Image (cartoon, rainbow, N blue to C red):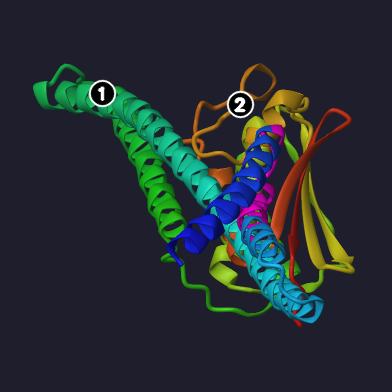
């Protein structure tokens, strides 16, 4: 009895070793392939080893043909189920691995963005704070006496204070977006009215630099959006266009409807964006180089990042591409439904 059991073990071991060696060679050939292929191969090798061992032992025992068929059918049924489960498991494991890899990459991007943001904000706050301190000390120590110079100092203090307030406001908005704390109150919003209000606010800035600002008078659709956040999207795009457009340039705003919903486009004559910079335009703290440097030195590089965050929160998308003499930002938003 013990001898028979030992022989059964040896037959099973021999069959399993042959299959295992073949599986090891196959896995070596599959280096660089997907996780699904590797996991499914492992499951297949394990099932094949069991099947080979059972068949080897069954044939060595010289059982009847009918009994052998019963054994083979039973083993085949079990093998089919195991392979099916193995395939599903390998797909789920591969999907989980891909998701985990994307999550790690996303975390690395967020961390890089956070470091860049801290560096940019520190730089943007240090300069106006130093100026405010110097002007405040000059006023306090009586270094300046004439009313005209004092008025200039007061005006500069107000301008720099407003600039820092806008930067802090942008930081707060961006933090809400990144933290998932943004709560939208959706309603049907006439896009034309939002654009009209944004143009009215931006027009004095554009006029002061001789920039022509145009907006279509009709054809504006309604969109499903939160009006305050949509107004900020349009305002940021217009301010961004005016800021980067040279004096005597042109900024135009158009909109309409397409099969996906509604669209809004802001075009300028900034001279275009370098092709290498186009994918980075909506990154936090990115303000461009050379051909797209702000004329007024303002901005913390957060406006377009906020635009992307708010548009995506609405289920829309935003893109930018170069056009003759400038660039064009296009926002797609869902229709009123």
Q: Quadrant of residue 141?
A: top left
Between 210 and 297, the one nearer to me in the picture: 297
Magenta portion: prevailing SS class: helix
In magenta segment, residue 53? no
Q: Is 244 situated left or right of 76 in this image?
A: left
x and y, in percent, of residue 188 in the image: 68, 81
Name the residue nearer the viewer: 127 or 308: 308
User: Label 2: how many residues lie within 10 Å, few (<14), some (14-19) or many (20+)?
Assistant: some
Q: Secondary structure at mark 1?
A: helix
Q: Are marks 2 and 1 in contact (CB under 8 Å)?
A: no
User: Which quarter of the image is occupied by the C terminus?
Assistant: bottom right
Q: Which range is magenta?
A: 29-48
- In the image shown, does 181 or 142 lie closer to the viewer? 181
Reading the image, the residue beneath label 1 is 130
> Residue 5: which numbered mark, if any?
none
At 54% across and 51% down in the image, what residue appears?
10
* Residue under numbered circle 2: 288
Number of labels in the image equals: 2
Q: Which residue is rendered at x = 70% and y = 27% of the image?
A: 247
Residue 186, x across and y down, in percent: 59, 79
Q: In 3D space, how far apart are the residues under numbered discs 2 and 1 (Cα atoms)?
A: 25 Å
Where is residue 147? Give x, y as percent: 27, 27
Q: Please tell me whether residue 84 is drawn above or below residue 112 in the rendered image.
A: below
In primary-sequence order, the first of circles 2 and 1 is 1
> Residue 51 in the image: x percent, y percent?
67, 62
């Amino acid at each position: 009895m013990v001898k028979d059991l030992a022989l059964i073990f040896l037959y099973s071991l021999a069959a399993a070793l042959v299959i295992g060696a073949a599986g090891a060679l196959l896995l070596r050939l599959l280096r660089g392939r997907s996780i699904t292929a590797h996991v499914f191969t492992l499951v297949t090798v394990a099932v094949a080893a069991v099947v080979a061992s059972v068949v080897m032992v069954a044939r060595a025992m010289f059982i009847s043909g009918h009994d052998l068929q019963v054994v083979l059918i039973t083993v085949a049924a079990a093998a089919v189920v195991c392979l099916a489960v193995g395939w599903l498991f390998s797909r789920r494991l591969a999907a989980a691995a891909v998701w985990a890899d994307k999550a790690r990459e996303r975390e690395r991007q967020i961390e890089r963005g956070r470091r860049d943001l801290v560096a940019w904000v520190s730089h943007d706050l240090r300069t106006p704070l130093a100026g405010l301190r110097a002007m405040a000390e000059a006023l306090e120590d009586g270094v300046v006496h004439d009313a005209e110079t004092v008025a200039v100092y007061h005006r500069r203090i107000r301008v720099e204070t407003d600039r820092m307030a806008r930067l802090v406001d942008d930081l707060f908005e961006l933090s809400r977006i990144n933290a998932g704390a943004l709560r939208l109150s959706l309603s049907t919003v006439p896009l034309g009215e939002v654009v009209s209000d944004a143009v009215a606010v931006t027009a004095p800035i554009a006029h002061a630099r001789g920039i022509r600002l145009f907006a279509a008078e009709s054809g504006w659709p309604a969109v499903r959006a939160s009006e305050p956040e949509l107004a900020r999207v349009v305002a940021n795009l217009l301010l961004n266009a005016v800021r980067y457009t040279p004096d005597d340039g042109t900024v135009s705003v158009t909109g309409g409807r397409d099969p996906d919903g509604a669209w809004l486009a802001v075009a300028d004559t900034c001279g275009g964006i370098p092709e290498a910079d186009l994918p980075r335009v909506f990154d936090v703290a990115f303000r461009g180089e050379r051909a797209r440097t702000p004329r007024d030195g303002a901005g913390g590089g957060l406006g377009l990042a906020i635009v992307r965050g708010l548009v995506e929160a609405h289920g829309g998308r935003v893109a930018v591409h170069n056009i003759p003499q400038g660039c064009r930002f296009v926002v797609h938003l869902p229709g009123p439904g």
